[in-house]
Amino acid sequence: MTVFLCSKCVSAITPELAELASVPHVSDDERDRDKETRRAPSTVPQGRYAIDPEPWGPPYVMQDDQEDPKPAQSRGPVVCREEGFVISAGSRHTVLVHPDDAAGLQPLPN
């Protein structure tokens, strides 16, 4: 079991969680989205966490194959900018948890 802590104040962010072997598939069906928030369902079941080995988030770089572009990041859409199709070159090994397992987290101001 693993508990995730704040690196600054060392407070627990999650309860004890068990690791999944891989990131579960997430539905891309619009009917599965929350009716009010339009958010997709959680990828990770409550009480578990997964490590995503793929790059996630910025920076984005040009894709080599502009004729057959791939999604910009795992579990994401194809992204085209003025210069062409881009792909994430962001950090790897992102920790994914169920939102209810880190319910006290708040976005940073601004």
Image: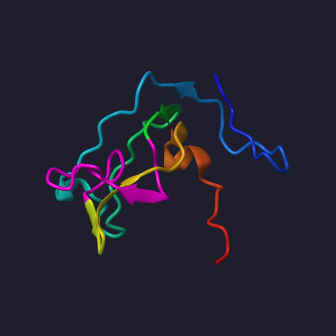
Q: Could you tell me what secondary structure mostly forms the magenta stretch?
A: loop
x, y percent for residue 104: 65, 55
x, y percent for residue 84: 27, 66
Q: Which residue shows up at 27% across the image and 57% down it?
A: 77
Farthest-out residue, bottom: 110
Q: Any magenta on residue 24? A: no
Q: Which residue shows up at 64% across the image and 63% down it?
A: 106
| Quarter of the image that includes the N terminus | top right
Specify start and end residues of the magenta stretch as a single range: 55-78
Image quadrant where residue 85 sits: bottom left
Farthest-out residue, right: 9
Q: Horizontal placement of 43 versus 77: left or right?
A: right
x, y percent for residue 95: 55, 39
Q: Is residue 34 above or below residue 44?
A: below
x, y percent for residue 58: 49, 58
Q: Horizontal placement of 63 versus 51: left or right?
A: left
Q: Which residue shows up at 45% across the image and 44% down it?
A: 55
| Quarter of the image that includes the C terminus | bottom right
Q: Is residue 55 above or below residue 22?
A: below
Farthest-out residue, left: 67
